Amino acid sequence: MGIDLASLSLFPATPEQVLESRKRTFPQWGRGLTLDQYLRRDAAMDVHEHAKGKLTTWVLADRADHTSLDFFCSCESFKRQALQAPKRSTTAQWCVAYGIASVYTPPRNRGRGYARHMMRLLHWVLAHGKNLPEFPVEWGMPPTRPEEVGDGLFSALWSDVGSKFYLSCGMTLESQGWEVRSPQGTIFIVEDLQRRLSSGSVLGRKVPEMTLLSPEETSFLWINDTIFIEEELSKHSSDVTRVSFAPIGGVGAYTSRRTSFFIPESDEEQTLKHWGVKLDIEGESPTYVTWCIEVDPPPTKLLITRLRSEPRVFLELMHAVLIAAQELNMEKIEIWNLPSQLVAIAGELGGVTAFREDHLPSLAWYGPPPSSGVEWMFNEKYAVFPLGYKTVDSDARVSQVPMVLRD
């Protein structure tokens, strides 16, 4: 029996529904934590800059009883600052965008189309009022937009259920939803990288001064990095619109901060005291990386969340990254969407670049069509929300494995 879509709608969750949604996800996403630890972790993260006043939990519920704890499925959105450079423009403009997370349908409600309908309705509360199609009559009345949302130029999510499901979740029955954009990753084996860097590739070169970055120091880095991103978007006109999330507002800090919840308290060696490193090289533009770690499931990884480097100093930067990975006892190093001019150098260091099969960055565009005329720049790990959630939806029909330090 099909569901009556007109009888359902999307609503901001009440505090009681927020708590219920988190209790529901615990069996799937709470690996390594007790329920109390799981709930306290999320409550602790809610007060930080990335979420405070920016996080909305959404529920798909019956219109007649939308505050009930018996809602069908839920998800979260995070309001973010972003930048866009319209096509043929050399001026980047500030805009609002959204990161989407925690798409979850309890087992009893899966396979009925609830998650797909929820995600379709989500566009209608996040997208700004321009360029909207006519709301499908078979869905009843459009969902009500709270004042604090409804101004997004685009939204993004990171799919663990392939590329097709979220693409099928458009604003109408005929339109497309979130399209996968450049799911490329480069992975280094730490032991192999150590061997290659020790074989002479950096020997004889002047070792630059290396500064490890504390959490406080990275907050200043994100400000400067945002200026750099804005300059890059404005540097050249293009036949496509270029967009990027800004790492300020707690966005860049989120992935590193969340790591602390998954490091064993007794393991002092894996306390994440530093969130990145920068090199001070005379005559060079700022060179730096930021990171978080993944300790479960194995193998352990140092995940580079943001990287800025010219080709001529990339070897020195990777040497600094190697030192950090070894001090944290990481087995692998992973970088998302390494700049094209660095891929060949990475290959010489043993880095294997390939398309990932999970955490697929996917974008929905709410600006002037077509969406194919939009390029997502700086599509790196820093933008991911939330690290630690394995997306689960009712219609995807895939095997789900609880993840701890993965988005």
Image: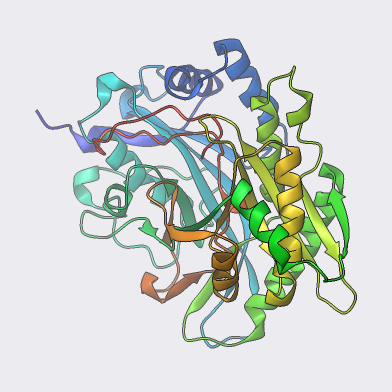
Residue that extends furthest to the left in the rendered view of this protein: 1
Q: Residue 163 appears at what percent x and percent y?
A: 31, 52
Q: Residue 350 appears at what percent x and percent y?
A: 55, 60
Considering only vertical position in the picture, is 92 above or below 299? Answer: below
Question: Looking at the image, which residue is at 49% across and 40% down?
Answer: 101
Asked whether residue 287 appears in the rendered view, the answer is yes
Considering only vertical position in the picture, is 190 above or below 228? Answer: above
Question: Looking at the image, which residue is at 67% across and 39% down?
Answer: 53
Image-quadrant location for residue 330: top right
Image-quadrant location for residue 316: bottom right
In the image: residue 138, left or right of residue 245: left
Looking at the image, how many numbered discs can be counted on the residues?
0
Comparing 309 with 346, the one in front is: 346
Question: Looking at the image, which residue is at 82% across and 59% down?
Answer: 278
In the image: residue 287, left or right of residue 92: right
Colouring: rainbow
Comparing 198 with 46, the one in front is: 198
Question: Looking at the image, which residue is at 55% across and 39% down?
Answer: 386
Quarter of the image that includes the N terminus = top left
Q: Residue 192 appears at what percent x and percent y?
A: 60, 52
Q: Residue 56 appears at what percent x and percent y?
A: 55, 37
Asked whether residue 147 appears in the rendered view, the answer is no
